[in-house]
Image (cartoon, rainbow, N blue to C red):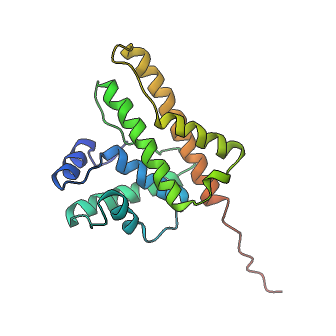
Amino acid sequence: MSTAISYSKLNDELRQHEIALTSAELHGFLTGLICGDATLQHWQPLLYQFTNDDHAYPNALLKQVERLYSQIKQQLADMEDFSFELFLPEGDDIFARADALSEWVNHFLLGLGLTQKHLDKEIGDIGEALDDLQDIAKLSYEPDDNPQELTAALEEISEYVRTIVMLFYSHFNLSTQVPVNHSIN
């Protein structure tokens, strides 16, 4: 993810302010909100309610979160370049990355569910993608799993999640835009 926001620094900030959320969970939650309703103006009360017991974030942290929110929104809107990336920890610990992916998906589904109240009625590609995400949210591994095989599987799953996210963004946002007729009859 090309950003000035550091995963580990944001994690440290969240911990410092006793917000029981990782950077991956926060990114997933915000992405779910945006995918469900990119026009949502009052997203911060949802953020506070579901991530901090209804308490506002400290100003310095909130500025970082607002930057992250804007960045996600911009990346999702850039459908041609497919620049959206999952915000997962860097490094060689594949098990930590697998856990973070599962947490990201869980929080994505939470954010999406808050903005799209009838997800259980979705059918076709959207319904199947929701089922797949629910399975990915339960992602597990064994400590003796082959790290190289897990790395390859995680890369495939991450790419699939990115694709699903873009599908949801276009389904819930772009397909609901009705062209305005400016002609005078």
Left or right relative to 14: residue 119: right
Give x and y (percent) for residue 30: 42, 55
Which quarter of the rendered picture does the N terminus lie within?
A: top left
Residue 68 appears in which quarter of the rendering?
bottom left
**Residue extending furthest toward the right:** 185
Q: Residue at x 47, y 58 (%)?
A: 33
Q: Residue at x 48, y 53 (%)?
A: 32
Q: Which residue is drawn at 23% across and 59% down?
A: 61
Q: Which of 159 and 51 is in front in this view?
A: 51
Give x and y (percent) for residue 9: 21, 46
Give x and y (percent) for residue 29: 42, 52
Residue 85 shows in the view? no
Residue 104 appears in which quarter of the rendering?
top left
**Residue extending furthest toward the left:** 16
Which quarter of the rendered picture does the C terminus lie within?
A: bottom right
Give x and y (percent) for residue 125: 68, 42
Left or right relative to 185: residue 155: left
**Residue extending furthest toward the bottom:** 185
Q: Nearer the viewer, residue 95 or 140?
A: 140
Q: In this view, does 145 lie above or below 7?
A: above
Residue 132 shows in the view? yes
Left or right relative to 71: residue 157: right
Q: Nearer the viewer, residue 44 or 74?
A: 44
